[in-house]
Structure formats: structure tokens, C-alpha cells
């Protein structure tokens, strides 16, 4: 990897770390283990700082060092994390994100325009560090000549007294100071988990004075520690230096437990069972060599018997308890699984994926052409070959589309920050609940749905959630809640944006719509139709304009952007209880399974996931509905809708469509069967055409139009055909 590639990797990883840091800050109050959340924040800042130093990005290192210093004081308990500090650290995340964006744009030096903001943030960070009480240093660490109250102990005495305490053998790495770590800070933090009963400083590794380097660390420590914390919590104190240090944590009492825990504390590297046992001190090298010799000696076993397992030899010989062997084997499995997991993930540039999908689309069209030729000349060998080719192309298509599928959780997590900031701006107490974040859809859809969802969330906070005093008067909790939910349904992904606010007022919406001339005063509308009037251009019922909403712009743009993704949006509400906006989107914008139908000489494609069944047409001419097993099924006649000339065939068919909770029947002349459909966008000239979402190329080279099922649903209910162009 060259330097430019390494820098791009640093940029990508820094953005991920900043996102993790932001999420941890926003959820630190909800974390079950607040120390773990604080450690995650510190870890992100420390990693960015260390990586930036590799590229000599001094301005990023300098700023992140101040952030890291404050977080270090939070970790050791000398500074308390409060709401004001969370807001400050979020601002630091934004500033770091700006520096990373500038780096991505090619600017490797500090931007003079943003330098004052950075200095102001550093000043506030230092103010929080200096404005709190001094660190509480455990008595056992405050070893000075003028402090006789602290007992000085030697190593032998420490070993005698440590049988009832945890024993921590600590050897800091030489470069720990150069890496920006303060050994004493870790010992202070250790004091939060219990009492340091005694500590012995070991200067054995100190070189002669003339050879000493002031930037290197030579000291070791033997510590007797009285605590009820478990081993994992104690080890977590040193997690940021464990790669450079030698740390052995021996629990009190049980010797078997000592070995088990030492095995689990080994560095994450591949190691055979014997090496693990020797390294932790469970067996000696001589005992291991003897066991290996016994394992490999063919004279000590039958010819047909497999070699005896090393663990069994050690246990049978009384060298080690069975529980220790089990722990070592578990360690081996954990290491191998972790390395296998790491080897399965690679980064791929999104442009390469887009190019792959384009090539797969052309392959599908070429395969359809070959299949058509085979059917035309009736060559059995060619037909068999094209059939195999079609199956392989379908597998390649599915695999290529899976590469583009990403979880929507990354988009949802962005709204944690939005809700936090907007709630402060509005003076409301609002929380966010996220569900279904593991639902997957095409990365292009994810990228384009972010802005519409952003507006829906902000609108729900501004208009939907009432002020705390209004909520309390209505018997609700003072804290309002926004919920984001995603799930798959009928080949689509459904995203719900809900709030537990006051809900929509039908009478007010209807009056405003009549006042603006959007509907006729005599027209009767369903509740759903009234609620969906909020998506009309220029419509707003806000009593006052804020910088968030109320100007009558935005909701129509939301609907237009969602429809551009071949999706739909709907609103449901209960006055006094809340509102739910439901967005329905296709899983992919590139390739779909389609179903071909024909009306006259025109061929159309229907997304296969939207079709429930096909039935024979058995309805009186001109009738707009049919009886489907006791239920009324409204009909849409494509011949009338698109004004296609010619007479209908003698045996028409009905394609039963399902979109959400709605059904409709599509009357067509002929059913042509399934077809892999490569979606081609329509020219901007046809952007206003309704009921058509795109086009595709058939094997014959002809163009077929893809039907927009959501728009077709609006043509049913006795309203007849809609105008095809505005």
C-alpha cells in the first residue's frame, strides 16, 4: 500500500471513529456501564491521534491531544462528565470531522479560517480540566520521603501479603511515554476500582545514568490490590497500553483460577496449546517437551490408534488440571475465529461496485437476446446452453446486488445527533428510539433517503412533540419520543417515523386546504387523504415560522424525492396520541425481477414482488371492480389508462397487485411471464409522466416501460384514469 492509499484508509477509519465517538457521547447517559462508554470515547480520540502522527498531521495531533487529556481525567475520576462537557465534546467531533474533510480535499495543513474555532475549543477543554478538583491519588502511590504515613514495602513482603489480594505484575513498555501515555495516570485510574494495599517499584531495568533516555520508561511495578472487581474490569484499566506492556494479573486464593485467567489474558496471537501453557506458567518447558515426545512416540500406542491429544497427556500425567486445558483450547478457538473474521472483510470503492452492476445489467440484456435467438431457431443444444447461462446470470446478479446492500442503521444513527441538537434549540426534552437498524437496502437508496428522513424527524420534533407543560397537562411524560423503525415487506423496505405528540388536526388541515383552493369544499375525503394534504406544495398549518419549519416548503420536496426513488409516503395520525409517516422504498434501483404483460402492441413490466396472483378476466364490460373470493377488487384498465388503440383480446387477464395494505387488479391482454429487468431511467422529457417509473430493454432490443404500482393505486376507487402528464 502506497502513502496515498494509506492516507485514504486513515480518512475512512477516522470518519468511522468519529461516528462511534459521537454515538457514544449521545448515549453515555443510557449506557449500562458508563466507564465502558467513556473508554470507547477515549479510544476513538486516542486512535485518531496516533494514526495522525504517522502522517505528520501535527494540527490534528495537537487538537486531539487536548481532547484526549480531558477524557483521561474523566476516566480517572478527577473530572465528572456533565451535559455541558458532552456538548463541548460533540463540537470537538464536528471540528475534527471538518479537519478530516479538509484532509480529504488535499489540505494537509491547518486551515487559517478554522484555526480560531480550534483555539476556542481547546481553551474550553482546558477550562474543564482546570476547573475541577485535583485528582485523588491513592495513598499507596503518594510515596515521598516526607510522607511517613505511607508504608514502604519490598517485593518479598508484597508477595507474602498478596495471597489475600489481587497481584498485578506490571512492566510498562519502553516507548509508553513517547506514545503520549502517563503510567501514573493508569495507577490513579486503578485506584477507582479498589484499594492499592501496597506497591513496590522495581528499578532493575534502569541502565547506567549516561545511557538513560529521558523519553523512555524503565520502571516496573508489583502491586497488591484489594478489590471486588472482576479480572476483566481490572485488565480494562490498562487496555490502551496492553500492546506495549507486560501485564500479569493473578487473582487471590485459587492457583487453578490463576492459570485460567492468565491464559485468557494472553496477547491476541496464534499459539499452540503447549506454548500457551508454558507462557502462563501452568507447565514448565521440560514437562511440555516430555508430553510432546510421548505424543509423537509410535512405540507407546497401537498402530491403529490416533495420536493422543497433548491436553490429555498433560492431564493424565498430573501436570495440569483439566479446567486449564479447556481454557487454553477455548483461547485457541477464539483467536482462530477472530483472525478468520478479520480476513473476510475488505474495503471496496463504491465506483467499482457501480461499474460491476452496470456490467451485470448489460450481461442480462445480452443473455436475454441469446435466449430469444435460441427459441427462434429451435436449436436444442443452444437452448440448453442459454438455460444454463440464464441461471448463472441470475446468481451473478444476486451476488452483485448483495455487495451493494448496506444496513440502514448507519443512517438512523445520524439522527441521534440531530435529535440532541434540535431538542436543545427548541427547549424540549426529546429522545430517539431506533428499531430495525439491521434492515438492508441498496446503498444508492440509503444515500438519497437521508435528507427526506432528516426533514421528517425535524418536522416531528417541531410540530409533533408538544412542550413539556402541555404534555404534563395531558397526562403524558414530559419527555417526548421520536421512533425510527425499518422492516422488509413485499420486496420493499418500509421506514416509519413516529412521534408521541399531539397528532394532526383533521379539521384544521381541511380548512387550510379549502382556503388555499387545493380541494373543493363539497368534496368528501377520507382521513388518509386529509392527512396526506400536508405534502401539497406550499401547505402549512404552523402558527409561527421557525428556522426549522413553518414556511410551507419542505414536505412537498420530501414526497417528490421519495417518489424519485420509486417509493411512496403515507401519513397516519391520532389526535392527541401522535403521528406516523410511512415511507415505502424499493430494495434496489438497479435490477429487479419483473413480470411482462402486453396490451395491444405495447409491452409493460410489473415488479414481481408487487404481484399476488394472475386470474382470468370474468367481469362485465365497463365494470370497474370484480369479486375476488368474496372481496371487492377495484380494476385498472391499462388500455384506457394509456389510451392504447385497438380492440381487447378475447381472453383478457387480471394481474392482482398488492402495495402495502392495498390491492388492485390490472386488466391486460396477454401474460408473457417473468423477466430479469435492468432498470433504465427515463429521459427528463418524460419526468412528469405518471404511472411509469422507468424502462428496460428486451431481448429483441425493443423498449418496455416499467409500471409504477404506487401511482397505479391512485387510479382506483372510481376516479378513473389519471392524466399522464402535468
Image (cartoon, rainbow, N blue to C red):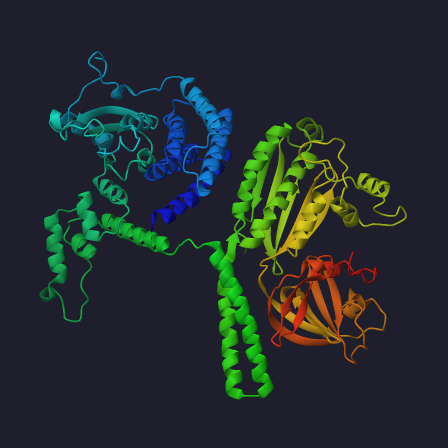
The quarter of the displayed image where residue 139 is located:
top left
Image vertical order of residue 183 relative to residue 56, above or below = above
The reply to whether residue 631 is visible in this rendering is: no
Q: Position of residue 142 (x, y in %)?
A: 26, 18
Left or right: where 345 falls relative to 307: right
User: What residue is shown at x 23% (from left), y 13% (from top)?
Assistant: 149
User: What residue is shown at x 57% (from left), y 88% (from top)?
Assistant: 378
Image vertical order of residue 61 relative to residue 565, above or below = above
Left or right: where 119 falls relative to 573: left
Image vertical order of residue 102 relative to residue 164, above or below = below
User: What residue is shown at x 56% (from left), y 54% (from top)?
Assistant: 444
Q: Position of residue 416 (x, y in %)?
A: 55, 38
Q: Position of residue 612 (x, y in %)?
A: 67, 67
User: Closest to the observer: 315 or 140?
Assistant: 140
Left or right: where 257 falls relative to 56: left
The reply to whether residue 360 is visible in this rendering is: yes
Amino acid at each position: 500500500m502506497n502513502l496515498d492509499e494509506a492516507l485514504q484508509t486513515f480518512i475512512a477509519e477516522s470518519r468511522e471513529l468519529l461516528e462511534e465517538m459521537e454515538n457514544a457521547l449521545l448515549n453515555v447517559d443510557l449506557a449500562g456501564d458508563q466507564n465502558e462508554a467513556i473508554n470507547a470515547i477515549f479510544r476513538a480520540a486516542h486512535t485518531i491521534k496516533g494514526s495522525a502522527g504517522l502522517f505528520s498531521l501535527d494540527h490534528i495531533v495537537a487538537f486531539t491531544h487536548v481532547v484526549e487529556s480531558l477524557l483521561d481525567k474523566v476516566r480517572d475520576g478527577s473530572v465528572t462528565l456533565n451535559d455541558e462537557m458532552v456538548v463541548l465534546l460533540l463540537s470537538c467531533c464536528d471540528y475534527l470531522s471538518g479537519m478530516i474533510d479538509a484532509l480529504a480535499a488535499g489540505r494537509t495543513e491547518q486551515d487559517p479560517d478554522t484555526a480560531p474555532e480550534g483555539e476556542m475549543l481547546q481553551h474550553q477543554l482546558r477550562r474543564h480540566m482546570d476547573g475541577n478538583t485535583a485528582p485523588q491519588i491513592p495513598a499507596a502511590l503518594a510515596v515521598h520521603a516526607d510522607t511517613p504515613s505511607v508504608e514502604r514495602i519490598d517485593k518479598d513482603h508484597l508477595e507474602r501479603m498478596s495471597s489475600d489480594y489481587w497481584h498485578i505484575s506490571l512492566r510498562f513498555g519502553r516507548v509508553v511515554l513517547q506514545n503520549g501515555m502517563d503510567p501514573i495516570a493508569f495507577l490513579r485510574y486503578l485506584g477507582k476500582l479498589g484499594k492499592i494495599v501496597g506497591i513496590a517499584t522495581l528499578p532493575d531495568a534502569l541502565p547506567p545514568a549516561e545511557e538513560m533516555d529521558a523519553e523512555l520508561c524503565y520502571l516496573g511495578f508489583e502491586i497488591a490490590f484489594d478489590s471486588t472487581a472482576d479480572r476483566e474490569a481490572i485488565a480494562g484499566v490498562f487496555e490502551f497500553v496492553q500492546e506495549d506492556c507486560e501485564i500479569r494479573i493473578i487473582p487471590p486464593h485459587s492457583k487453578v483460577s490463576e492459570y485460567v485467567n492468565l491464559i485468557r489474558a494472553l496477547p491476541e496471537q496464534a499459539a499452540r496449546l503447549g506454548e500457551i501453557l508454558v507462557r502462563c506458567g501452568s507447565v514448565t518447558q521440560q514437562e511440555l517437551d516430555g508430553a510432546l515426545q510421548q505424543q509423537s512416540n509410535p512405540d507407546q500406542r497401537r498402530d491403529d490408534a490416533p495420536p493422543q491429544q497433548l491436553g490429555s497427556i498433560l492431564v493424565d500425567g498430573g501436570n495440569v488440571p483439566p479446567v486449564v486445558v479447556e481454557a487454553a483450547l477455548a483461547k485457541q478457538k477464539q483467536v482462530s475465529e477472530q483472525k478468520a473474521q478479520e480476513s473476510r472483510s475488505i474495503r471496496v470503492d463504491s465506483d467499482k461496485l457501480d461499474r460491476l452492476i452496470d456490467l451485470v445489467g448489460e450481461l442480462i440484456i445480452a443473455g436475454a437476446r441469446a435466449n430469444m435467438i435460441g427459441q427462434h431457431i429451435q436449436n436444442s443444444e443452444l437452448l440448453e446452453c442459454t438455460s444454463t447461462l440464464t441461471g448463472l446470470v441470475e446468481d451473478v446478479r444476486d451476488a452483485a446486488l448483495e455487495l451493494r446492500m448496506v444496513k440502514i442503521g448507519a443512517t438512523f444513527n445520524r439522527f441521534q445527533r440531530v435529535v440532541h441538537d434540535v431538542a436543545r434549540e427548541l427547549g424540549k426534552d426529546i429522545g430517539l428510539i431506533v428499531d430495525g437498524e439491521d434492515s438492508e437496502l441498496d446503498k444508492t437508496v440509503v444515500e438519497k433517503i437521508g435528507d427526506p428522513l432528516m426533514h421528517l424527524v425535524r418536522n416531528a420534533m417541531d410540530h409533533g412533540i408538544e412542550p413539556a407543560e402541555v404534555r404534563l397537562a395531558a397526562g403524558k411524560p414530559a419527555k417526548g419520543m421520536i421512533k425510527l423503525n425499518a422492516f422488509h415487506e413485499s420486496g420493499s423496505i418500509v421506514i416509519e417515523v413516529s412521534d408521541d405528540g399531539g397528532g394532526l388536526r383533521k379539521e384544521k388541515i381541511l380548512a387550510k386546504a379549502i382556503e388555499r383552493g387545493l380541494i373543493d369544499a363539497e368534496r368528501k375525503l377520507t382521513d388518509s387523504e386529509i392527512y396526506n394534504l400536508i405534502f401539497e406544495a406550499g401547505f402549512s398549518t404552523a402558527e409561527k415560522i421557525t428556522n426549522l419549519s413553518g414556511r410551507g416548503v419542505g414536505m412537498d420536496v420530501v414526497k417528490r424525492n421519495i417518489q424519485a426513488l420509486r417509493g411512496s409516503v403515507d401519513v397516519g395520525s391520532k389526535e392527541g396520541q401522535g403521528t406516523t409517516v410511512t415511507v415505502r422504498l424499493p430494495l434496489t434501483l438497479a435490477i429487479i425481477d419483473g413480470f411482462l404483460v402486453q396490451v395491444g402492441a405495447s409491452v409493460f413490466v410489473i415488479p414481481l414482488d408487487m404481484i399476488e396472483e394472475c386470474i382470468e378476466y370474468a367481469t362485465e364490460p365497463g365494470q370497474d371492480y370484480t369479486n375476488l373470493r368474496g372481496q371487492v377488487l377495484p380494476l385498472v384498465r391499462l388500455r384506457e389508462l394509456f389510451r392504447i388503440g385497438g380492440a381487447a383480446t378475447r381472453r383478457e387477464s387480471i394481474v392482482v397487485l398488492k402495495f402495502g395494505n392495498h390491492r388492485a387488479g390490472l386488466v391486460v391482454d396477454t401474460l408473457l411471464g417473468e423477466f430479469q429487468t435492468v432498470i433504465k431511467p427515463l429521459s427528463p422529457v418524460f419526468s412528469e409522466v405518471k404511472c411509469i417509473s422507468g424502462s428496460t430493454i428486451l431481448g429483441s432490443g425493443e423498449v418496455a416501460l416499467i409500471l409504477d404500482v404506487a401511482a397505479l393505486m391512485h387510479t382506483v376507487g372510481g376516479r378513473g384514469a389519471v392524466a399522464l402528464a402535468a
